Image (cartoon, helix red, strand yellow):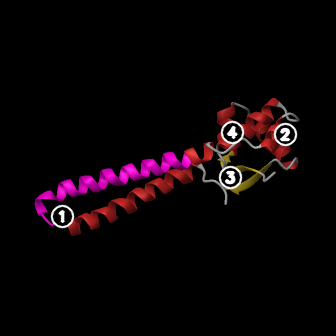
Amino acid sequence: MRLLTENERLMASVILVFIMYFGLDSLFSLVIRDESLVRGRLTLSFVTAMASGIVFYVYSRRSISVAEPDKSIMILKKALTDDEIAIIDMVKDTPGVTQDSLRFRTDFSKSKVSALILNLEKKGIVQREKTGKTYKIFLSKL
C-alpha cells in the first residue's frame, strides 16, 4: 500500500467532513426534535465534522513523518549529486509530487529536472507515472 499524496489526503479529509456532517446531522435530528434548536444542531454537526477532518489530515501527515529514515536511501545519497539528492528528498517528503511541481520547488530548469529524473529512473531510484501532460514521481521500492 502506497502512502497518500498531499492532494489525496486533503480530498479524503474533505470527504470525511461531508460524511460526518450529514451523518451527525441525521443523528442529531433524531435526538434533538425541538425545531428551535435546528441552528444549534447544524452548528454542532459542522464543528464536529470540521474537527474530525482536521484531526484526520494532521494525523495522516504525522504517520508519514514518524517513519524512520530508510538506510538504503542514506547509502544511495553518498553516490548521488547534490541536485539528485534534492530531488529525492522532495519525492520522499511528498510521494506522488509532479515533475512540474519539482521544477518550481527546486528552481531548476524544466530540462534539468527532466534529465535528473530520467537519470534517477534509469538507476532504479524513482518511478514516473504519467498524469496528463506531466508525471507523478514516486520512490522505487529499494
Tell me which residue sits at (62%, 42%) in the image. 65
For label 1, the crowd category at 10 Å Cα-Cα, with few meaning under 14, some 14 to 19 and many 20 or more, is: some
Element under label 2? helix
For label 3, the crowd category at 10 Å Cα-Cα, with few meaning under 14, some 14 to 19 and many 20 or more, is: few
Q: Which residue is mark 4?
A: 90
Type of amino acid under label 3? Lys
Callout in the foreground (4, 3): 4
Q: Are marks 2 and 3 in contact (CB under 8 Å)?
A: no
Work out whether 78 lies above or below 96.
above
Q: Which residue is mark 3?
A: 133
Main secondary-structure element of the magenta-colored stretch: helix
What range of the chain is rendered magenta?
33-61
Type of amino acid under label 4? Met
Element under label 3? loop
Q: Which residue is mark 1?
A: 32
Q: Which mark is residue 76?
A: 2
Work out whether 7 lies above or below 27.
above
